[in-house]
Image (tube, rainbow, N blue to C red):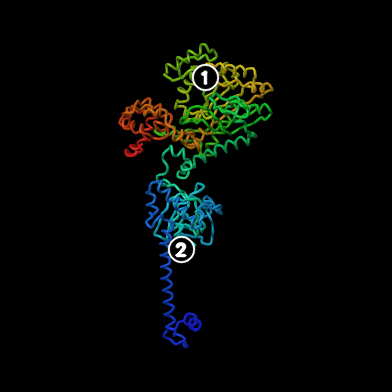
Amino acid sequence: MSAAETEAGKWTESCAVSGAKEEKTSMNEPPSKNELKRRLKAEKAAKIKAEKAAKKAAEAVIKSANAPSNTAPHMDQEEELDPTAYFFNREKMLIDMENEGINPYPHKFHVSTSLPEFHEQFGNLENGRHLEDTSISVAGRLHSKRASGSKLLFYDLRGDGAKIQVMSSLEMYESHESFYKIHHLLRRGDIVGIQGFPGKSKKGELSIFPRRITILSPCLHMLPKAHYGLKLQDTRYRQRYLDLILNDETRKVFEIRAKIINFIRHFLDTRRFLEVETPMMNMIAGGATAKPFVTYHNDLHMNLYMRVAPELYLKQLVIGGLDRVYEVGRQFRNEGIDLTHNPEFTSCEFYMAYADYNDLMTMTEELFSSMVKEISGSYQLTIHRDPSEDPISIDFTPPFRRIKMVTAVEEATGMAIPINEPEVCLPILDSLVKKYELDCSPPRSIARLLDKLVGHFIEDNKANWTQPFFIMDQPVYNSPLAKYHRETAGLTERFELFLAGAEICNAYTELNNPKVQRERFIEQTRQAADGDDEAQPHDEAFCTAMEYGLPPTGGWGCGIDRLAMFLSNKFNIKEVLLFPAMKPDDQPSVSEGSGESVGVSPSGSVDVEALEMSLTRGAFVNGEAPSKADARAFDQVKVMDNVVLGKYPNVRKWVQYVGAFSAEVRSKW
């Protein structure tokens, strides 16, 4: 039956309902087929026209519904606003949403597929294919926004370290009105939930095609553009959440850090070690030569010390019969902050009964070589200790080079060092330190003087940097908890592992003779009386525990932060700490009150040597943020001879940092 015949059959009823008395045909006669066709065509045209008019009206209403006024700026124009104005605009938008009954912070959104899973499941689709029958829901943070007319919008959705494209089409959305409304509300940085279907664009971009988008948590602040990222170090360290939002590289660094810790735990667990936890607050700050933080316990009415190392507790557990124990945890040392030191840091220490330092050197080679291969894919690791210099390639293929400390210094200086005769040894070391113009602050003890010579001739010798190397057989003066050497008097069975001049781990055959341990503590007490604030205190409780019998034991400790620096190729420890120690934003620098900065006078004249020292404390003259002092000094330093600046690596890096800003920006510091 034709459409015209169907219409004729219903004519009488429809005419009565509509009161169609104006028709040319009689009330008692049906219209002709041609007349019915004309009516159908006219009704269809009217319906299409009405839909277009309604859509246009809805679009106009929705675009202005949540705006402060009819002249509200477009999103691109909005991002040209002052950040404060942008924030207030977004707050106004939230108020309008709530007034309309829209909750901008819903309690729950069901996520069926994470973004990494989305890639795994649909990454192999052919270009242009859409799986419209597959309904999924994803969530993440919106980044860039692009439009292709008013009916097709594109976003980048990021989450869990992955990115997909959101390809939102008017025709595929649940309704035209809700399409225009949601896209008027969305801004870069918003966290959203998306229900839709997967597919690929014609160009092969893996995408989700939304049926519905829900705002889960709006971003009220204007994000930096993804193309430029977040560059200022100070902002990156203080607002790590913002750094993680904008810089994928930052996320990868902390993924590497997590892999390092997991690898160490697995390595030890498979060798029957037991992970334990020991106190972080102690009555005595023992276990390492370091200056402690002091706190106060209100209930006990006494000072306590934040631990500098867990060593003494772990060895008591070995005395108690836990033959293999380890701990991964925080240590606290009240010392300087620089490119490789942070007052709060993470370490791993393990203790292994019936092992000595030779066993631990072999274990260390196995641990680090297998870790580097697992994480980086080979035994070769390329790092940048200094961004202004060429990269360094380190070969982790075992075995590693073993350097005897005192012997190496004797060979380098051509002087015999009678380490077992302190009265003779001290003046020799003092004269060598003066001869090579090495700086050693008081007290100039054998341990401190020798440490300066070792740093100069062994640690900083780039000929040793082609692979990890052990410095071994340290003197008793440097090692109060290590066991005396079985062959050479005055030395201990201790080693430290170095990578490109930086100490990574420290280990030794543990001293298990309580009588000798007491003597060592007494010597440390004497050094403390002479002004050495890093000398270890006398721990009689530990000596008493040793009297119950500590088996022959090897002890090992590793700094996780420095290890993460190497495996992620970062030269600043702040890059591998999620929340590094920072001076408060509103705290003035030491010299700020006088208007002067170290190395820079108010007129801008520069003492390059003083400036070099100042820059060891931060990326800029007064710390981690640029100031007028940087701008004044830069104008003079930038014209200096490169040969002169070559002697000052910190100044060279500072010139690169400051030079990245335009003169106009520097003038506003």
Could you tell me which quadrant the C terminus lies in? Answer: top left
> Percent x, y for residue 569?
46, 36
Q: In which quarter of the image is residue 62?
A: bottom left
Does any portion of residue 50 appear in the rendered image?
yes
Is residue 216 depicted above or below 516 in this figure?
Answer: below
Location of residue 491 with respect to 65 vertically, above or below: above
Three-letter amino acid code of the residue under disc 1: Asp
Q: How crowded is mark 1: few (under 14 residues within 10 Å), some or many (20 or more)?
A: many
Gap between marks 2 and 1 measured at Cα: 76 Å
Name the amino acid, label 2.
Answer: His
Q: Tag 2's secondary structure?
A: helix
Q: Position of residue 71 (x, y in %)?
A: 37, 56
Asked if residue 361 can be seen in this view, the reply is: no
Is 613 on the left or on the right of 17, as rendered? left
Q: Which comes before the other along the chain, label 2 or label 1?
A: 2
Front residue of 639 and 67: 67
Task: Check residue 532 in the rendering and tell me which mark sits there, or answer none.
Answer: 1
Secondary-structure class at tag 1: loop
Point out the residue furthest to the left here.
639
> Foreground: 512 or 160?
160
Within 10 Å of the Cα at label 2, are there few (<14), some (14-19), or many (20+) other Cα atoms? Answer: some
Residue matched to label 2: 176
